[in-house]
């Protein structure tokens, strides 16, 4: 309870049996003191459960004892309940401080919860924003890539219609440009189809046993005539018996993309070296060339769709900017990864890491 600005607690005790309070009159100086000398009387209370062991004494101002008062003690007072009042100001002050700190902590906790919720929501939305941005950029780039050859085809067709009197031989330049852009559009469509399927999750792998060393030799034999025409040496250092479970056609496409890029950007007199090693449970394939290399600002973006460091040169080479994106998708679909390292003017190294089958143990086909 609160009284006059202070806090009190009331304690109440009910006794199981009465507590007798006996009262006797004694001089203030004590039972043995000279009552006449004190000039007054005093009283003492004695507690007990009965009156048999108590007595009382009283004194008067004349100094003579009163026999009646000495032989007749006062009646005991029975006590049935005990009540105590305790000051609780210190405890209440502590409770008030605790309540203040609790409110402060609750406010800070609420603020931190809101901030953490906003942060986590932003983190959760980041992949969605990135995916949306990639999709938007992919659509814009695809539209641009398709619009350009269509514009060239349309312009050359209109040019030929403007001169109907000319022969096919005279229009040979326009016809060749139309044919080249049509082929480029067909190639672009062939590359866009697997990317669209991979985005929708409908592109599946036909898994089987693949000997990587044999596959690399096969692809290099396909590139030998092109390399010879361009004056580029093809070299190989392949560990034998490196196997994995994968899609042979997709892995061959990955190798074709890497060798085709290296061949396009390696001048005559240069070399392309393909190595295959086994490192633990990984098959590591590297395609190194002595070409022109990739600029440092372009290197982090070369696996993005439609990205080309030198757009004019890549367009002249027939590039679409989709090859390395497909190569990365193939590597990741097989549980691996692809990375690039390059120094401008000294060449580029593409490294593909794929999970290999246990050494010395043939792998079974996936059903």
Image (spheres, rainbow, N blue to C red):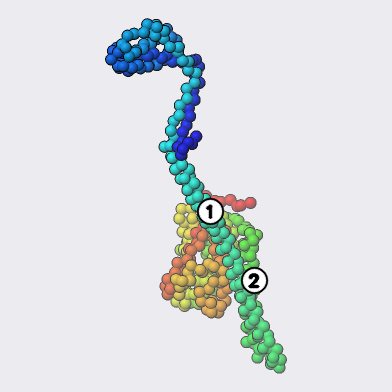
Residue 310 placed where, x, y %?
A: 51, 76
Establish if 37 lies above or below 89: above
Q: Taking 237 as reference, is 204 left or right?
A: right
The residue labelled by disc 1 is 114
Residue 272 visible: no
Name the residue nearer the viewer: 37 or 303. 37
Establish if 354 lies above or below 295: above
Mark 2 lies on a secondary structure that is helix
Residue 59 placed where, x, y %?
A: 34, 12
Q: Residue at x 52, y 50 (%)?
A: 110
Give me the C-alpha separation between circle 2 and circle 1.
48 Å
Q: Taking 154 as reference, is 46 left or right?
A: left
The residue labelled by disc 2 is 189
The quarter of the picture where residue 175 lies is bottom right
Query: Quick one: label 1, few (<14), some, or many (20+) residues within 10 Å?
Result: few
Name the residue nearer the viewer: 154 or 92. 92
Residue 344 placed where, x, y %?
A: 43, 73
* Residue furthest front in the image: 62
Q: Residue at x 46, y 71 (%)?
A: 297
Residue 12, disc: none
């Amino acid at each position: 309870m609160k009284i006059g600005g202070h806090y009190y607690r009331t304690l109440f005790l009910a006794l199981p049996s009465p507590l007798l309070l006996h009262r006797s009159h004694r001089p203030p100086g004590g039972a043995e003191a000279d009552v006449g000398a004190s000039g007054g009387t005093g009283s003492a209370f004695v507690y007990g459960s009965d009156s048999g062991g108590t007595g009382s004494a009283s004194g008067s101002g004349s100094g003579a004892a009163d026999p009646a008062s000495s032989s007749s003690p006062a009646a005991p007072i029975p006590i049935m309940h005990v009540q105590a009042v305790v000051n609780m100001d210190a405890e209440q002050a502590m409770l008030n401080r605790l309540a203040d700190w609790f409110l402060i902590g609750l406010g800070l906790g609420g603020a931190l919860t809101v901030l953490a919720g906003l942060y986590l929501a932003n983190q959760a939305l980041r992949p969605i924003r990135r995916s949306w941005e990639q999709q938007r950029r992919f659509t814009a780039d695809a539209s641009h890539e398709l619009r350009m050859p269509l514009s060239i085809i349309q312009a050359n067709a209109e040019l030929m219609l403007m001169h109907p009197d000319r022969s096919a031989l005279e229009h040979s330049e326009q016809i060749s440009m139309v044919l080249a852009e049509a082929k480029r559009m067909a190639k672009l469509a062939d590359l866009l189809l697997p990317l669209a399927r991979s985005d929708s999750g409908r592109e599946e792998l036909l898994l089987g046993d693949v000997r990587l060393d044999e596959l690399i030799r096969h692809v290099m034999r396909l590139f030998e005539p092109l390399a010879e025409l361009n004056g580029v040496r093809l070299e190989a250092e392949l560990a034998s018996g490196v196997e994995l479970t994968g899609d042979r056609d997709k892995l061959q496409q990955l190798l074709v993309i890497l060798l085709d890029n290296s061949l396009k950007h390696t001048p005559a007199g240069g070399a392309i070296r393909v190595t295959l090693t086994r490192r633990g449970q990984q098959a590591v394939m590297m395609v190194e060339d002595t070409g022109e290399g990739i600029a440092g600002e372009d290197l982090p973006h070369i696996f993005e769709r439609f990205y080309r460091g030198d757009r004019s040169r890549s367009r002249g080479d027939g590039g679409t900017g989709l090859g390395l994106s497909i190569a990365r998708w193939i590597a990741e679909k097989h549980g691996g990864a692809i990375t690039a390292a390059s120094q401008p003017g000294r060449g580029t190294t593409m490294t593909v890491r794929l999970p290999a089958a246990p050494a010395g143990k043939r792998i079974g086909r996936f059903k």
